[in-house]
Image (cartoon, grey):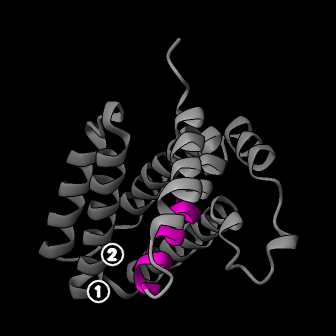
């Protein structure tokens, strides 16, 4: 039987907690802290794992939707036109087979367009692009807060919706 990824993570946590950490000399606080940090990250990854694929799908869909929206708002000079063409090229083939690379490429093209708009975009276009980018950032920040809620750093964690429920609802409603 091949162990699941979750089982393998549990095994790593067990090994670090019960074998490695006790073997680190008590005076070696940096080494002990680092081992505990690795354990904490493994626990967070184990929690995120069931929702990681949908999180990435939502992030890619949001980046693509933002890119398409930005293209409708472009009015300006050659820098903005060049950035719009680059974004169109990326959107034509985001290659969802490698989601992480696709997310990086689409986000980079979106950022390039936003920056170019500030160079030679018409004022109304610059403002509309800024508004669209900020709205996208607000939605992404909420997804990030929900995805990383178990890290314990969000002071308002109790106000966040359940990760699985929220992501499934977002995917079902096509909201990005």
| Element on which disc 2 rests | helix
- Crowd rating for badge 2 (residues with CA inside 10 Å; few <14, some 14–19, many 20+): many
Q: Is residue 29 magenta?
A: yes
Asked which quadrant contains residue 40, the reply is: bottom right
For the point 37% across and 51% down, the residue is: 103
For the point 38% across and 88% down, the residue is: 123
Which residues are drawn in magenta?
A: 28-41
The answer to which of 119 and 49 lies nearer the viewer is: 49
Does the magenta stretch mainly form a helix, a strand or a loop?
helix
Residue 117 percent coordinates (x, y): 29, 79
Left/right placement of residue 56 relative to residue 119 reads right
Asked which quadrant contains residue 86, the reply is: bottom left
- Crowd rating for badge 1 (residues with CA inside 10 Å; few <14, some 14–19, many 20+): some
Residue 165 percent coordinates (x, y): 81, 44
Asked which quadrant contains residue 31, the reply is: bottom left
Residue annotated with mark 2: 114
Left/right placement of residue 105 relative to residue 146 reads left
Residue annotated with mark 1: 118
| Element on which disc 1 rests | helix
Whether 106 is drawn above or below 121: the answer is above
Left/right placement of residue 145 relative to residue 137 reads right
Q: Is residue 120 magenta?
A: no
């Amino acid at each position: 039987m091949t162990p699941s990824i979750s089982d393998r993570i549990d095994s790593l946590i067990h090994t670090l907690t019960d074998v490695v950490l006790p073997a680190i000399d008590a005076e070696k606080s940096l080494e002990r802290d680092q081992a505990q940090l690795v354990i904490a990250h493994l626990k967070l990854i184990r929690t995120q794992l069931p929702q990681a694929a949908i999180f990435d799908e939502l992030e890619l869909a949001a980046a693509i939707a933002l890119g398409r929206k930005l293209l409708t708002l472009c009015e300006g000079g050659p820098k903005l036109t060049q950035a719009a063409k680059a974004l169109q090229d990326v959107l034509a083939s985001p290659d969802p087979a490698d989601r992480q690379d696709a997310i990086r490429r689409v986000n980079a093209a979106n950022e390039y367009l936003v920056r170019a708009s500030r160079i030679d975009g018409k004022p109304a276009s610059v403002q509309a692009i800024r508004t669209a980018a900020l709205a996208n950032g607000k939605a992404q920040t909420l997804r990030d807060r929900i995805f990383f809620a178990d890290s314990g750093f969000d002071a308002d964690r109790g106000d966040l919706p359940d990760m699985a429920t929220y992501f499934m609802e977002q995917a079902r409603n096509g909201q990005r």
